[in-house]
Image (cartoon, rainbow, N blue to C red):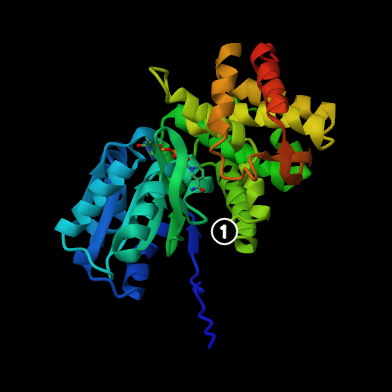
Amino acid sequence: MKHTVRTISKERTQIFFGDGVLSLIKKQTSALSVNQDNIFILADSQTRSLCLPVLFDHVPYLSGSKVLEVEGGERCKSIETAGFLWQKLNHYGADRNSLLINLGGGVATDLGGFVAGGFQRGIRYFNVPTSLIGQADAAIGGKTGVNLENVKNQVGLFYPPTDVFIFPGFLKTLPKNHLRSGLAEIIKSLLLSDPIHWRKLQNIPVNSLLDEQTESLIWKKLISAAVAYKVKLVRKDFHERNIRKALNFGHTIGHAFESFSMTDDRKPALHGEAVAAGMICAAWLSSMKTGLSHKTMKEIQNYLDAGFDRISFTVDDIPKIIELMKFDKKNQDGKFRFTLLAAPGSPRINVSCEPHEVSEALLNYSQQQKSL
Ligand SMILES: NC(=O)c1ccc[n+]([C@@H]2O[C@H](COP(=O)([O-])OP(=O)(O)OC[C@H]3O[C@@H](n4cnc5c(N)ncnc54)[C@H](O)[C@@H]3O)[C@@H](O)[C@H]2O)c1
């Protein structure tokens, strides 16, 4: 006898973007038939004090919901924090019909999505991203997870939110270093998606963008371009078996930098800072392996160097950084697999790179003067 069961549901995520989106939350929760007292809001200490009052102003209906607070920051994206949140949900009597609303940056949406996916084998959740990384990238696409022993996103689930509400007004209170960090993911998306986007972006240096009001049209255009590109790839390849891997440009080395910066007593690099450094290395590898022109490689390096500090490490640290790359989820058969570029708008996925090539890229990065 043989049975076949459809195992993947056809659920959809709705993504709302704009100044009026928060007022849609009440309607969307009603559509799910969730009782008001069965809604939980996850926030970190910062978004609780700065963003939760904004959410309540727009959606007074939520003001009776229970708030689950975590400290915040990359170190709290852990299995221990997930355990703490599952216990909280349990104590509050959450059930299969509960709704979790993640209010925060990529840490809150990655962690909260994972918690929602694990609690009673999966409850529904909304993402209300408040950081630039959250709005342009992390809140979309259902990649959820936590870090394990300093290894980024080592435990997680593909578990999509029911709805995402992107309200640019939250960015008003986001500290500048986090805005800069978020820009790295936007730069990545524009570089991957379209040569015209990349050409236009080069006319707007990172530092001049950071001087613009976050509610200005330019910011909205940048966020919506990044969202549109991500949606396009997630729609084609939700489980990241293929083209969605393009979004990892700069992340193979970037995640290793981020993990490396969390070891010992180092100052943790912000995600986007590490990704910007990872993109400089990936552009160098692209010029070696996938035909990226020297001119474009230099343009990428110059643009990023003008906006981001370099990650500092010594030659002796290179083996440690390479060791951390062994945890990258794209690796196959013990080989590093990179997303590289042939040209802006033309990513190449699954490019196999030898450790000595990666080592050369890192050496080149560490020895090179910042190109300014
Ligand atoms: N799942 C994905 O597809 C995906 C994609 C990209 C990044 N990520 C993950 O996202 C994380 C980085 O995201 P992040 O930079 O948003 O980190 P984060 O969530 O730690 O937010 C950064 C800081 O900004 C604060 N903050 C957020 N919104 C604010 C606001 N409006 N006003 C004031 N302060 C605010 C937070 O409290 C935090 O201190 C990393 O863990 C990364 O791995 C996930």
Residue 167 % position (x, y): 44, 51
Residue furthest out toward the front: 1
- Local SS, label 1: loop
> Disc 1 marks which residue?
239
Give the quadrant of residue 27.
bottom left
Q: Is residue 372 visible?
A: yes
Amino acid type shown at disc 1:
His
Asked if residue 347 is positioned above or below residue 312 in the image, the reply reads below
Q: Is residue 183 left or right of residue 336?
A: left
For the residue pair 136 and 96, the one nearer the viewer reads as 96
Residue 23 % position (x, y): 36, 61
Q: Residue at x 61, y 63 (%)?
A: 235
Asked if residue 353 is positioned above or below residue 346 in the image, the reply reads above
Q: Residue at x 69, y 32 (%)?
A: 282
Q: Is residue 294 left or right of residue 369?
A: right
Asked if residue 226 is positioned above or below residue 209 in the image, the reply reads below
Ligand 1 is located in which of the four quadrants? Answer: top left
For the residue pair 356 and 189, the one nearer the viewer reads as 356
For the residue pair 276 and 314, the one nearer the viewer reads as 314
Q: Residue at x 15, y 57 (%)?
A: 91
Q: Is residue 19 visible?
A: no
Q: Residue at x 31, y 73 (%)?
A: 30
Residue 304 % position (x, y): 65, 26
